[in-house]
Amino acid sequence: MRIQIGAEEIVTTYEPPNNGAGPLWCYGSPTLVRDGEAVFCSVPETVAGAKPLCNTRWQLFMRQDGKAGFTRVQAGPGPEEREPCPMARLSGGRILLLVNPKTRHLETWSTGESWACHPRLLQFDAGAADQPPQALEPVWDRPYAFTEHSYRGIAADSARGEILLLNIVGHEGQAWSFMDRSGAWTRNGMLRFPLRACYPQVALASRAAYVMAVSDIVEPNIEWRAHKRRVTGNDWDYDFRQLYFTWTPYITSIPFSPILTVASVDETCGHIRNLDLWIGPDGDAHLLWLERNVWHAFMRDAFFPDLPITVALKYARVRDGKVIQRRTLARCTEDRDRPPASPTADAPMREPRPTYAAFHAVDAQRLLVIYHLADEGGQAGGCYLQPLLPKPGPAEKIDLEHRLHTFFTATPRNGTSPSPVIDLFGLGATPNEIRYAQIRVAG
């Protein structure tokens, strides 16, 4: 496999909104798509003087291959969003932005003002991205009290011109709505998980629909919660310990399957981060996630003193709602000879630690994994590319000058066509800086 760096650029800078949502907060649904020779991305802009929580507006940026740099082509009307706005692409140069503008003040919290919000799609023409977008209004199965905490997801079947949206409704579940190729919102409903599920990865292929999400609730173990409060001083936290999956082979007529718990680290107070979802031509779902057996070293010390902390990048293949294959792609173990620098610091690792990963489809058969390893114990970290399908291969380091530790890729589940070009968009070493890297693979 030959790897060539095509570009490394700054997209823009941002000011932290202090509203609980950063520029990659919607990590289940990327804010990046490719349409032919053009790359589009969405970056939130913090509006000076605006009160959290809805104190940002969306910005749409565009880059043409062969030309250096991104240009901002449009921006939202004012401070009306809390979260970054995911993107999708449909054939014919249709670029979609999933927005969630505020509509009505609900209450004032210690962290800011809560608002009722109105999720909808804005459709841009890739050939005239600076022109006003068309608004597309999803239809839900009943009226919902949507707010600025949307945990929303989007999937696009680009060739068929169809869309699937998700938006959370408190702790009830994820409301979903399907738009067919005619532009009609013909099916909708509610996905209910064993626990509140957030940050969904969503995929749509020939009307088969797939959803992966992670549990996200306040610490349910009273003893663990009390110890966390003693150490951190916080009255609450949120824990992510169960990985969920559901699907339907035909969304217009067959209900979603019972929820499958793909992975759980609930017994050891661990942490799971759902990363990516890819659907093969055979309909198999390929899942990628990070798994940490114990999230915090101080929790291990108090409750699992003999258990070394491990961090692993994991993969599973799901067929007809059942896991048929599992693999660990990268793994590191705690260095017990080097204690954390403070009670709340991360545990030092003996090997480079995986921090983030995503799939990249070169074509319908070839699937790669791109991942970042943090420097640990004086060993070299960086970004790596590893073949996964049709057969696994060795990982190769990507010689980026400015490596990205957290990133989005332009993915088929959001409507980008498979390609030997990898578009990366994310965060590097410089604070408050959004960067882009273009990588070409051959062989």
Image: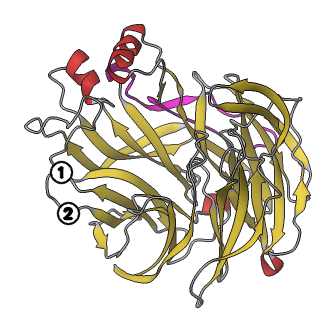
Q: Would residue 133 appear left or right of 345 to someone viewing this image?
A: right
- Of residues 53 and 118, the one drawn nearer to the viewer in this rendering: 53
Pick the quarter of the image with the C terminus: bottom left
Q: Which residue is mark 1?
A: 351
Tell me the distance, in whole angstroms, between the alpha carbons under discs 1 and 2.
9 Å
The residue located at (37%, 8%) in the rendering is 223
Amino acid at pointer 2: Ala
The residue located at (29%, 41%) in the rendering is 311
Give neighbour class at mark 2: few <14, some 14-19, many 20+ (Cα, 10 Å): few
Query: For the magenta stretch, what is the residue range?
Result: 240-268
Identify the image's colour scheme: rainbow, by chain, secondary structure or one colour: secondary structure
Q: Is residue 422 left or right of residue 379?
A: right
| Secondary structure state at the residue bearing disc 2 | loop
Please name the residue shown 89% across and 47% down the image.
185
User: Where is residue 343 shown, x and y percent of the image?
Assistant: 25, 28
Mark 1 residue element: loop
> Residue at horizontal 55%, vertical 68%?
364
- What amino acid type is highlighted by mark number 1? Glu
Residue 79 x/y as whole percent: 76, 50
**Nearest to the observer: residue 359 or residue 307:** 307
Q: Is residue 6 left or right of residue 304?
A: right
Q: Is residue 205 visible?
A: no
In magenta segment, residue 246: yes
- In the rendered image, residue 362, in percent from the top left (x then y), is placed at 50, 72
Q: Residue furthest bottom?
A: 66
| Nearest to the observer: residue 335 or residue 287 | 335
Q: Which mark is residue 258?
A: none
Q: Which residue is mark 2?
A: 380
- Residue 245 forms part of the magenta stretch: yes
